[in-house]
Image (spheres, rainbow, N blue to C red):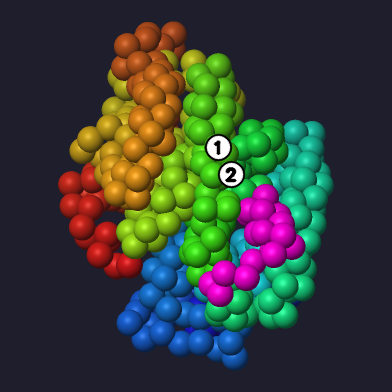
């Protein structure tokens, strides 16, 4: 609960920064506030607390909240240069902080009303941020499309919650679990579960409810796309697994078959579509869809190790994505292009940046000894032990397709000539972010047990 209080107060203070004229000190204040929130969150580990039956800060919530705060800290460092150019920097910072409040609620809810509130607090903030580049038509389109599609998906989610309440008479997860586990499920309850599945699949960008993601990711400012691909996706899957593992594990046979097919469609649509892209930003958008498919395999498996596998995968994916999007942001500003061709020959003039990008691409592709390899390994291990060997074999085939388009970036940097060999200037904060994320990607790949035992 302390985490929510700190983030909320920090967001309110940010709103008053222009009035009291401490805009210049706002950025370090936010970093200090995030560090404080992280400290108080970690202190709650192995000290579960339930607040009024609405919020449950157990180890699951603590671990995911801590990871979200770490990723947010790195994101603020990555995005500072972009926001310094904005006249409404305080509004942008406040929206991000309030969206973090929604993310923390999503990973710690103990009641369906809190799940809905968490999703809406997060989503409404991101709708505005996606359209924050007012001079860019694509950004305006991105925010408008995200808002319309997100509102439509929220309708499915609310309808599902309504049906579950109609059957069980409660929004409380424990009560719903007790009712569902009696074996007296009705068609209304199963319909409610499937509607919840649709609503959360949209938030997680699982096919066939992924269609918004490529356009929204491409049109939004690169920094906001980074936020959506990391913090938003981590919170969405944490909420997805918390709800279905707590309430609907006993009737998994009714919804896992649906999710099984959704995973396969997601893997192939994401990877095959990414192969066709010339824009690195759009390629990473389809890549994000494909990674959602891999994460969802752990939800299909629904075993004792699923939570750890989802946490490890979302964390390592987020770290690698921050590296990739940071470099994309730097290169696109320098060359005014987001195409893969903009990276041609970059290794000669910018060896350190190229190395960081290579590590990120290898991790996203799942190549050892990076963290991405063990992320896929733990997901596949969980699925095989739950009897989903065929699904794992299909996922491996999809992963092989993914290797192709990730290596296109590496080949462009190291094996294609650049017409003008000009070093790209990298700011101090961007250097720090790239060094931290690259080290973490390699370190977590060599020592995955550093975090796997937390859940």
Residue 396 position in % (x across, y down) = 36, 30
Residue 187 position in % (x across, y down) = 72, 60
Q: Nearer the viewer, residue 113 or 394?
A: 394
Q: Which residues are magenta?
A: 181-200
Q: Nearer the viewer, residue 405 or 357?
A: 405
Which residue is outermost to the left? 446
Mark 2 in CB contact with mark 1 (< 8 angstroms) = yes
Can residue 101 be seen here? The reply is no
Label disc, if present, on residue 115 of the rendered structure? none
Q: Quadrant of the C terminus?
A: bottom left
The question of residue 384 being in magenta is answered with no
Q: Which residue is mark 1?
A: 261
Image-based side of 348 in relation to 2, left or right: left
User: Secondary structure of the magenta portion, mostly?
Assistant: helix
Q: Which residue is mark 2?
A: 258
Which residue is outermost to the bottom? 52
Q: Residue sitting at 64 percent across and 66 percent down? A: 185
């Amino acid at each position: 609960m302390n985490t929510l209080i700190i983030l909320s107060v920090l967001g309110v203070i940010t709103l008053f920064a222009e009035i009291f004229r401490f805009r210049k000190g706002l950025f370090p204040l936010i970093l200090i506030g995030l560090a404080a929130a992280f400290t108080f969150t970690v202190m709650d580990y192995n000290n579960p607390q339930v607040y009024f039956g609405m919020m449950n800060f157990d180890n699951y919530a603590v671990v995911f909240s801590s990871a979200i705060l770490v990723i947010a800290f790195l994101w603020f460092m990555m995005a500072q240069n972009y926001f310094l150019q904005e006249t409404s920097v305080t509004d942008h910072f406040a929206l991000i902080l309030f969206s973090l409040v929604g993310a923390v609620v999503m990973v710690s809810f103990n009641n369906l009303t809190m799940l809905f509130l968490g999703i809406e607090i997060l989503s409404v903030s991101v709708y505005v941020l996606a359209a924050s580049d007012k001079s860019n038509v694509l950004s305006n389109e991105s925010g408008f499309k995200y808002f319309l599609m997100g509102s439509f998906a929220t309708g499915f989610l609310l309808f599902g919650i309504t049906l579950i309440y109609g059957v069980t008479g409660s929004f409380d997860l424990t009560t719903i679990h007790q009712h569902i586990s009696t074996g007296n499920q009705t068609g209304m309850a199963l319909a409610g579960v499937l509607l919840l599945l649709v609503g959360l699949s949209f938030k997680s960008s699982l096919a066939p409810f992924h269609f918004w993601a490529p356009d929204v990711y491409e049109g939004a400012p690169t920094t906001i796309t980074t936020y959506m691909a990391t913090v938003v996706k981590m919170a969405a899957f944490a909420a997805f697994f918390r709800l279905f593992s707590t309430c609907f594990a006993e009737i998994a046979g009714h919804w896992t078959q649906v999710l099984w097919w959704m995973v396969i469609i997601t893997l192939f649509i994401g990877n095959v579509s990414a192969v066709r892209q010339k824009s690195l930003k759009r390629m990473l958008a389809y890549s994000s869809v494909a990674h959602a498919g891999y994460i969802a395999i752990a939800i299909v498996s629904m075993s004792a190790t699923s939570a750890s596998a989802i946490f490890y995968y979302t964390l390592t994916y987020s770290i690698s994505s921050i590296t990739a999007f940071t470099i994309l942001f730097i290169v696109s500003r320098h060359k005014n292009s987001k195409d893969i061709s903009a990276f041609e020959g970059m290794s000669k003039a910018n060896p350190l940046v190229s190395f960081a990008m290579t590590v990120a691409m290898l991790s996203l592709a799942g190549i050892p000894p990076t963290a991405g390899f063990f992320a896929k390994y733990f997901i596949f291990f969980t699925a095989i032990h739950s009897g989903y060997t065929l699904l794992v074999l299909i996922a491996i085939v999809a992963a092989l397709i993914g290797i192709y388009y990730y290596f296109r970036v590496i080949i462009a940097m190291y094996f294609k000539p650049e017409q003008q060999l000009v070093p790209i200037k990298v700011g101090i904060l961007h250097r720090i972010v790239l060094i931290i994320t690259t080290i973490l990607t390699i370190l977590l790949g060599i020592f995955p047990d550093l975090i796997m035992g937390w859940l």
